Amino acid sequence: MKAFSKLTALFLMLVLVGCDSDSNSNDEMEAPASNIVETAIAAGSFNTLVAAVQAADLVDTLTSAGPFTVFAPTDEAFAALPAGTVESLLLPENKDQLVAILTYHVVAGQVTSDQVVGLSKAATVQGAELDIAVVDGAVKINDATVVSADVMTSNGVIHVIDSVLLPPTN
C-alpha cells in the first residue's frame, strides 16, 4: 500500500511537471488538471489526511466534479492531536466518527480566500457550521489558522490549515 501511494504520488508529480503551462490565449485560464485528492497526494504534506479520506471511503466524493472547498490540515496538524487519536479514528469501527470529522472540513462549492474573508460562518458538508474570522491579519477557521490559501484544483479549492477541526458534539 505504501509503495502504491509513493508510485501514485511520483506519477502525479511527473504529470504535473510535464504539463504545458504556456497558453496561446491570455483571455482564459485553464482549470488545474488535478483534483483535490491528487493535489493533496502530490503536495506530500497531507499523507495523514489522504489516509483518513481513504479509510472513510471519501476518495470518490473528493475526486468527483464538486466543486468543494476543503480546509485541509497538514500532517503536523494531525500529529498535534493526542497520542493514539489518529490510529483510533482509522479503525473500521470508528468510520462514522472519521467521516463526520472529515466532512466538517468541507464546504460545498468553491469558496476562494477573497470570499472566505467576507464570511463569519460557513455550512459544512457534515452539517455544522464553521466560524470564520480575520484576527490580526490571519484568517481563522474555528481555532485553526489558514497558512496557505487558494490551492486551486480541478474540482474546487484547498485552504491549508494548521490544526484539525472537530465538529461540535451535541
Image (cartoon, rainbow, N blue to C red):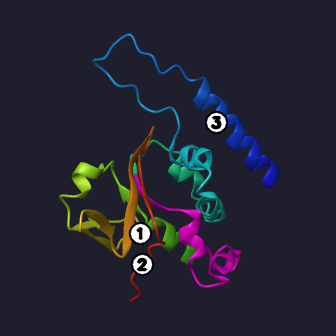
Residue furthest left as drawn = 118
Helix, strand or loop at disc 3?
Answer: helix
Q: Marks 1 and 2: in contact by CB < 8 Å?
A: yes
Of residues 85 and 103, the one nearer the viewer is: 85
Q: Is residue 144 left or right of residue 94?
A: left
Q: Which residue is drawn at 40% across and 25% down?
A: 30
Q: Where is residue 26 in the image (x, y as percent from the top left)?
A: 31, 17
What's the CA distance linking mark 3 and mark 2? 33 Å
Tag 1 or tag 2, which sits nearer the N-term? 1
As shown in the figure, which amino acid type bears the numbered disc 1? Gln
Out of 75 and 54, give the one closest to the viewer: 75
Q: Quadrant of residue 145?
A: bottom left
Judge whether 57 appears above or below 4 on screen.
Answer: below
Against 121, is 64 above or below?
A: above
Disc number lying in front (2 or 1): 2
Question: Is residue 1 at all visible to an observer of this figure?
Answer: no
Part of the protein shown in magenta = 69-96
Q: Mark 3 points at which residue?
A: 13
How far is disc 2 from disc 1 in space, using C-alphas? 8 Å
Q: Do the residues labelled 3 and 1 touch (CB within 8 Å)?
A: no
Is 118 on the left-hand or right-hand side of 165? left
Q: In which quarter of the image is the N terminus?
A: bottom right
Give the mark toward the camera: 3 or 2: 3
Q: Tell me which residue sits at (33%, 68%) in the image.
A: 141
